[in-house]
Amino acid sequence: MGVGVVIAAAGSGQRMGDQGNKTLLNLRGKPMVLHSIEVFAALPRIQEIVVVTRRADLGSVQRLVSEAKLSTAISVIAGGKERQDSVRYGLEALPAKTKWVIIHDGARPYITSEITLAALEACYRYKAVGVAVPVKDTIKVVRDGLIRETPQRSELWMMQTPQVFSYPIIVRAHQHAHRKGFKATDDCALVEALGIPVHIVLGDYANIKVTTPEDLTERKSYLVGFGYDVHRLADNRPLILAGIEIPFERGLEGHSDADVAAHAVMDALLGAAGLGDIGEMFPDTDPQYKGISSLKLLAKVCAFLDHEQLFVNNLDLTIMAEKPKLAPWKNKMRTSLARVLGISEARINIKATTTEGLGFVGKGEGIAAQAAASLVRSPD
Ligand code: MG
């Protein structure tokens, strides 16, 4: 049937924190791009595969293709400045007798033969087909920080690859775009620009484009931290716990508002992030922190986490006090922390306990708090 494949594997992977070609990174024991190459090479009706990579990677890709000993003809060529240029070069490298072409991103290693064949079958009929999945989230059009439009979610699809075309149509679409200086982020858009209808074939949510290093790890890893703090109870002080003022005849003493619960939470977060502790971050010798609301400090800790691209997965806090009874305040404290942390209340758990009259807590000399927190590098 004259089916050719173009695999775009010239990605620089800036978001991978790596200057190299991300499609050559190891995934389950082999370079990412080889996963796709093997899927296509295993389909008997595919005659030729062109892998387009960076000039600097020609040698490595050629080597990995020859070591894989696949029976399909595979050529490796150098790409252009942008993905669109690379795909155009790939199309030009296919034999002129090619009838159908499958274009695929080398950074989508989870592609299956089932999806590829479904797209190819649809293409025999429709001439231009893109694999896509329905959008699950609500999508907004935003400009200058303002929502301008809310498109109907039922009409929105996330495009994946492969995208499969009649060879003469996609060659014409690329030449047309090249002449007009029209740039698009997928190949379907170039065919759309010719006024030719493009059909959709249902893809798979697992067919992700590997963008960040986390996409390569199959299990999410958690960073865990622990925090502990104690403050003395004194007269003529408000009692503030997790940002909530609790009516009581005494309050906690300290340089800031002495919110022992917020302090334990901050130390747990800083511990998980490997950022030291609150004493280092907000020294009690610094006058700017005198009497400050600890929730403001917590917000600063959150800003550090944001900067490190860390997200709070969950938080568990235990407050130890003989008096007052804290159970009626737990929900308010949870809401207060959730608001500052920018996470759902369901991810926060607060416990309150006495120490049965034992120790400094039991004698009412102070209040202690412990917190455990887990962080993730990408939210779910
Ligand atoms: Mg403290």
Image (cartoon, rainbow, N blue to C red):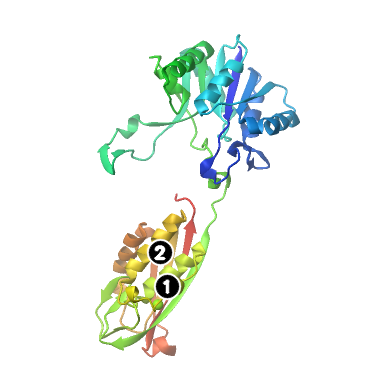
Q: Residue at x 50, y 25 (%)?
A: 84
Q: Quadrant of residue 90?
A: top right
Determine the CA span between mark 1 and mark 2.
12 Å
Secondary element under disc 1, as helix, strand or loop, is helix
Secondary element under disc 2, as helix, strand or loop, is helix
Q: In which quarter of the image is residue 341?
A: bottom left
Q: What residue type is labelled 1?
A: Ala
**CA neighbours of label 1 inside 10 A, class few (<14), some (14 to 19), many (20+):** many
Mark 1 C-beta closer than 8 Å to ligand 1:
yes
Residue 77 horizontal/vertical position (percent): 64, 24
The single residue placed furthest to the bottom in the displayed view is 363
Q: Is residue 322 above or below residue 211?
A: below
Q: What residue type is labelled 2?
A: Val
**Proximity of marks 1 and 2: CB atoms separated by less than 8 Å:** no
Tell me, yes or no, if residue 232 can be seen here.
Answer: yes
Residue 106 horizontal/vertical position (percent): 58, 32
Numbered label attached to residue 301: 2
Q: Quadrant of residue 57?
A: top right
Q: In the rendered view, does 207 fall on the left or right side of 157?
A: right
Numbered label attached to residue 353: none
Residue under label 1, please give it.
264
Earlier residue among tags 1 and 2:
1
Tell me, yes or no, if residue 317 can be seen here.
Answer: no
Q: In the rendered view, does 196 fall on the left or right side of 239?
A: right
Q: In the rendered view, does 43 fall on the left or right side of 82?
A: right
Q: In this view, does 230 lie above or below 24?
A: below
Q: Is residue 129 above or below residue 355?
A: above
